[in-house]
């Protein structure tokens, strides 16, 4: 099988020749530095590890200089402070640490819905953001790989990053018009992005937000169903109207078990990242294996940073026997490769998949 055939077979919950795999969300800067030191960096990590899928997405729009400065006027001269295309500020403790960034939300203190209405959002309709997609995807397909269209941080995470986590969670309960206004505005942009990505020919549309943590949902199921589910439903219906056969991937770290049936009902057919620290793989496969494929599964909290190569080999075999029983699995790390993951463990993972991932 080609890599694309392997991915498409597995995501259709059928049995490929072997389990397909990816590099998940890539590597942190320090982990990538180690990769370059160890390999010379002549090819991408996806090429080096012979991953079966490639990711594509929009280019970020070019914003007017200083567009968001007034929302961060007291921070713009701080060391390592950056403002992204949505106006969200981040400040790192230095220029190399990836995870330990503090978020500064531009609408964190607003007390009028008019400010949300007037807030400048990025313009992704410029063809420079997406005109390359079709040609790029065609080239990836011709090389034999599957293509996943990136739409992560789809709605909830982006909204709270702009509004502030505490403020946005309060909006659900006491200012629902604020929440709906911001979600509506983000939704308009997301629908445009999804339309272009699906028309360009991706095999898998990746959607998702971290709506769960390790002990369960960040919000009640009722809040999720009222405020977020209808938007995901519309996005998926938009994608399926263009390509009825496209696979829909939904990402949430933690344990989203409370909403899995809701996701299935609106057309999600791939669950990611399936964290082993807080999800029972046998339970997931038994309850949902006839409706969902699973993508991920390799733990980054304990196994990859602190396990041994033999631990990793045994875990690959275990995941194949649970989530991968009868197909329906794409293996990969559950998050971005962190600096504390030893190089020997990264190589052990992909060597183990190549050795034990075969069905035939």
Image (cartoon, grey):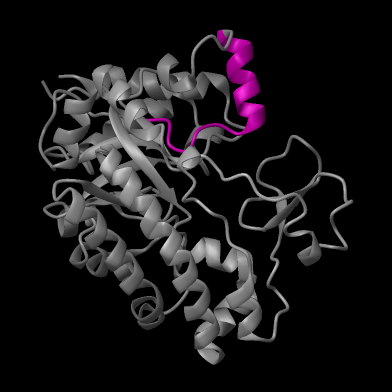
Instruction: Name the residue located 41 percent from the left edge and 50 percent from the top edge.
Output: 151
Q: Is residue 162 above or below residue 81?
A: below
Residue 23 x %, y % = 43, 31
Q: Which residues are magenta?
A: 22-39
> In the rendered view, does 37 fall on the left or right side of 14?
right
Q: Is residue 184 above or below residue 297?
A: below
> In the rendered view, does 100 fall on the left or right side of 123?
right
Q: Is residue 9 above or below residue 119?
A: above
Magenta stretch: residue 33 in it?
A: yes
Instruction: Name the residue located 15 percent from the left edge and 37 percent from the top edge.
Output: 327
> In the rendered view, does 264 fall on the left or right side of 91?
left
Write down the quadrant of residue 309 in the picture.
top left
Residue 241 x %, y % = 18, 56
The image quadrant where one finds the N terminus is top left
Most extreme residue toward the bottom is 174
Instruction: Name the residue located 70 percent from the left edge and 51 percent from the top edge.
Output: 64
Report the magenta stretch's main SS. Answer: helix
The image quadrant where one finds the C terminus is top left
81 or 252, which is in the foreground? 81
Task: Judge whether residue 218 can be spotted in this image.
Answer: no
């Amino acid at each position: 099988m080609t890599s694309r055939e392997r991915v498409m077979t597995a995501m259709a919950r059928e049995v490929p020749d072997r389990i397909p795999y990816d590099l998940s969300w890539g590597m942190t800067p320090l982990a990538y530095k180690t990769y370059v030191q160890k390999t010379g960096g002549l090819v991408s990590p996806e090429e080096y590890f012979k991953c079966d899928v490639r990711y594509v997405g929009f280019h970020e729009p070019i914003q007017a200089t200083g567009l968001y400065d007034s929302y961060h006027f007291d921070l713009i001269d701080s060391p390592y402070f950056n403002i992204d295309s949505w106006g969200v500020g981040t400040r790192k403790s230095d220029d190399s640490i990836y995870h330990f960034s503090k978020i500064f939300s531009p609408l964190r203190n607003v007390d009028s819905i008019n400010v949300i209405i007037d807030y400048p959002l990025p313009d992704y309709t410029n063809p420079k953001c997406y005109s390359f997609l079709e040609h790029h995807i065609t080239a990836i397909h011709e090389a034999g790989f599957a293509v996943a269209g990136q739409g992560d941080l789809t709605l909830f995470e982006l909204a709270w990053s702009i509004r502030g986590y505490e403020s946005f969670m309060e909006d659900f309960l006491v200012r629902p018009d604020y929440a709906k206004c911001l979600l509506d505005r983000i939704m308009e942009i997301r629908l445009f992005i999804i339309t272009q990505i699906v028309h360009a020919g991706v095999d898998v549309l990746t959607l998702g937000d971290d709506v769960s943590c390790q002990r369960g949902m960040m919000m009640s199921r009722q809040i999720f169903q009222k405020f977020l589910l209808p938007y995901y439903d519309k996005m998926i219906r938009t994608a399926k109207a263009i390509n009825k056969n496209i696979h829909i991937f939904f990402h949430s770290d933690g344990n989203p078990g409370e909403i899995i049936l809701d996701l299935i009902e609106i057309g999600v057919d791939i669950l990611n990242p399936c964290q082993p620290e807080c999800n029972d793989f046998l339970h997931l496969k038994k309850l949902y294996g006839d409706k969902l494929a699973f993508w991920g599964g390799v733990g980054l909290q304990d196994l990859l940073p602190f396990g041994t190569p033999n631990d990793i080999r045994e875990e690959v075999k275990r995941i194949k026997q649970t989530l991968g029983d009868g197909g329906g699995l794409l293996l990969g790390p559950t998050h971005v490769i962190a600096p504390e993951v030893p190089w020997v463990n990264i190589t052990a993972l992909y060597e183990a998949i190549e050795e034990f991932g075969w069905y035939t």
